[in-house]
Amino acid sequence: MKKFTRRSTIACVATVALVGTGIAFASWTSTGLGSGSASAGTAKNLTVSVNTNVTGLFPTGTVDVPFTVTNTNGYPITLSTATVSNIAVAGTAGTCAASAVTASPVTGVTERLAASAVSATGAHFVTLKMDANADNACQGKSFTFDLTVTGASSN
């Protein structure tokens, strides 16, 4: 009888093992599908503040005009250039021509501004130069200009 009991036990254990394995492999899987959307934001203009208290321009002379840039975007910006345009003589020009003052584009400005950050005051400047042939009427005159700073989103 021992043989029969031993065989029965072995057969019973083998059957339970096979049934248990079958149950483990018989589990079902399922997946789901959903849809969504995301919209791109809109870039905001940089804010440029130019120091207006710069003096000392004279024929063949130069002055450095500091400026500050504020990034109001929600992402970082790397600054690249600053360009002066629309130079004009403030007030009555007389014989003082606005062309007596020039500025070269500022390149190599590579400051990275974090989201919602301000550049260091005076960290950037544009250089204005007065022509050697500037008329005497330019003495004491103020010159206005527009400054365009360019940058791109960065990581």
Image: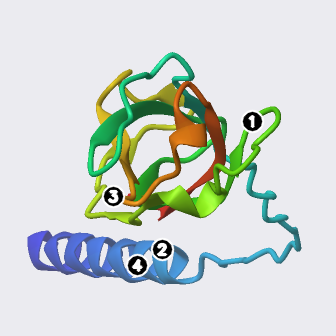
The mark found on residue 21 in the picture is: 4
Which of pointers 1 and 4 indicates the residue nearer the eye? 1
Q: Residue at x 38, y 83 (%)?
A: 18
Callouts 3 and 1 close, C-beta under 8 Å? no
> What's the amino acid at mark 2?
Ala
The mark found on residue 24 in the picture is: 2
Q: Residue at x 75, y 43 (%)?
A: 93
In the picture, the quarter occupied by the C terminus is bottom left
Mark 2 residue crowding within 10 angstroms, few (<14) / some (14–19) / many (20+): few
> What's the amino acid at mark 1?
Ala
Instruction: Report, in whole angstroms, how far the alpha carbon at label 4 lies from the one at label 3.
Output: 96 Å
Quarter-of-image position of residue 98? bottom right
Under tag 4, what secondary structure?
Answer: helix
For label 1, the residue is 90
Q: Nearer the viewer, residue 36 or 51?
A: 51
Instruction: Report, in whole angstroms, how far the alpha carbon at label 3 lies from the one at label 2.
Output: 93 Å
Going from the N terminus, do you reach mark 2 or mark 1 first?
A: 2
Q: Residue furthest left?
A: 2
Under tag 2, what secondary structure?
Answer: helix
Callouts 1 and 4 close, C-beta under 8 Å? no
The mark found on residue 132 in the picture is: 3
Count of numbered badges drawn on the protein: 4
Instruction: Report, in whole angstroms, how far the alpha carbon at label 2 lies from the one at label 1.
Output: 87 Å
Left or right for 150, reference 14: right
Callouts 4 and 2 close, C-beta under 8 Å? yes
